Amino acid sequence: MKQFRTCLVLSWLLFVGCTTLAGQEFTKKVIDDSIEEIIKHIEENYIVPEVRSKVIAGLMERHKSGDYVAIPTPEEFAEKVSNDLRELSNDYHLYLVAKSNDSKVNATPSRQMMRVNPDPAIFKNLLTYKMLEGNIAYLNIPMFGPLEYVKNSIDEYLELSKTADALIIDVRQCPGGSGESLAYLAGGFVDEPIHLTTYHSREGKQELHSFKTPYGTYNNDKEVYVLVSDRTGSAAEGFAFYLQQHNRITVVGMPSAGGGRSNNFFPVGDLFDVSVSIRNSITPNGKQFQGVGVQPNLITPASNALHQAQISLYEKLGKENPNKIGEYKSLIKKVGKPEVTPKRGDLGAIKRTVLGYLENFFENKTEEMFKYLHPSLAKRGLSRKRGTPGVFFEDMSNEQLTAMLQKKRVLEKENQVNQVEILDIFHNSASVRVATGYPGKMEWIEYIHLARLNDEWKIINIIWDYYPKKKQATNTSR
């Protein structure tokens, strides 16, 4: 079986906007054959046995139920199958891509990373860099291209960084790429190679170490900040996560996508390629970011991450260089605070998001409820064990939340009492207090954090606490 280039690419939009290959007729037989071949590649190559079995069974069931029969185009078929694969696996590296004859689509770095021999011209000048005020060397990475094609750009940046006082690496829009390239860049910040991670595959284990470069000695003691967002995936997450585990960098922004496995692309007929996870990545201290993402040291909306990193670095550099404290204070003032005034419609949008979650939760409408929740939602609370005075901390995964909705009793919308109080809105984040529950029986308070992602508010954190049972609250005012 011919395999495509192994790469750490997370891109859940590759199939959007593609053009069907000329001369290919999309028939029921093509759909049947494609599903059969997708299942074959997953069976032969997917790395997690229990997930592999679940995905195959789920895909077969949906195909048997006719979910894919009426889909008219390869692009829509790829989108539908990809959504189903990710829903079944919680693995953004498991998806289907419709091939295209559109030269613009094929000229993107993400498409090129699927090829055995990518076009070097696509990666020329892909990485951009500059020196920010305060002598901070900034590098923007939209994709970790193959090392042989991006090494010169990395070297040019690291050459610039030799005289810098601090460094900022921006991977907020980077879906992933080459593990070799991230390891080479990591070598620019440490004087000796370090063990970044170990890949576990069916063939065995393979360690990834940072490269020995001429630049590590210059930058070994400098502050390095890495900017991330929910669009940061795979190799880009690995770059931040591996160095974070060594306490070598400070991560700024929002939690990343959680694509902690690496993938291969396999051909599916003449119309598609399927991405399948073939390796797990586990750091020397036993950690991984699959499904949970990289957690920033400094949490701030992605759009504010560069400003936040600059301000933090100016403060640190000012303490280290008292003779320049005035200069750094001026730079902090110049960077300033981002505009934090809520946009028109924010109050209504935030309240609708919170009520959408609550109302569908009580009515046991699982699919509708999850539309308001971020996939990396952290839902947790304080519970009490019967007969004991203490409380314990309880995490609730999306799977547990789904299971709860399948068995708890329904509370119709007209019988719900959901009191929503917006506590604060800061740029692209918001904090909300909710008084809710089953009136007169079980009631609780939820504190909810939301983030504006791609102009849409999503719930990213929830913490709850029950009212004391002996003093059941009827007045929820603060």
Image (cartoon, grey):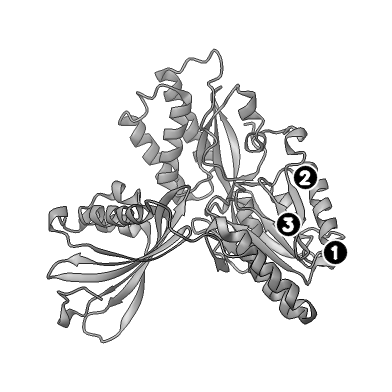
Q: Nearer the viewer, residue 173 or 477?
A: 477
Dot 3 lies on which element?
Answer: strand
Label 1: how many Cα within 10 Å (few below 14, some 14–19, many 20+): few
Q: Position of residue 293 (x, y in %)?
A: 53, 58
Going from N to C along the chain, the mark reached first, 3 or 2, is 3
Mark 3 vs 2: CB contact within 8 A: no
On the image, numbered disc 2 is attached to which residue? Answer: 150
Relative height, residue 226 to residue 273 (above, below)? below
Disc on res. 138: 3
Residue sitting farthest toward the bottom: 389
Specify the quadrant that holds the N terminus: top right
Mark 3 vs 1: CB contact within 8 A: no
Disc on res. 163: 1
Q: Quadrant of residue 362?
A: bottom left
Residue at figure coordinates x 78%, y 64% from the top left: 135
The amino acid type, in three-letter code, at marker 1 is: Thr
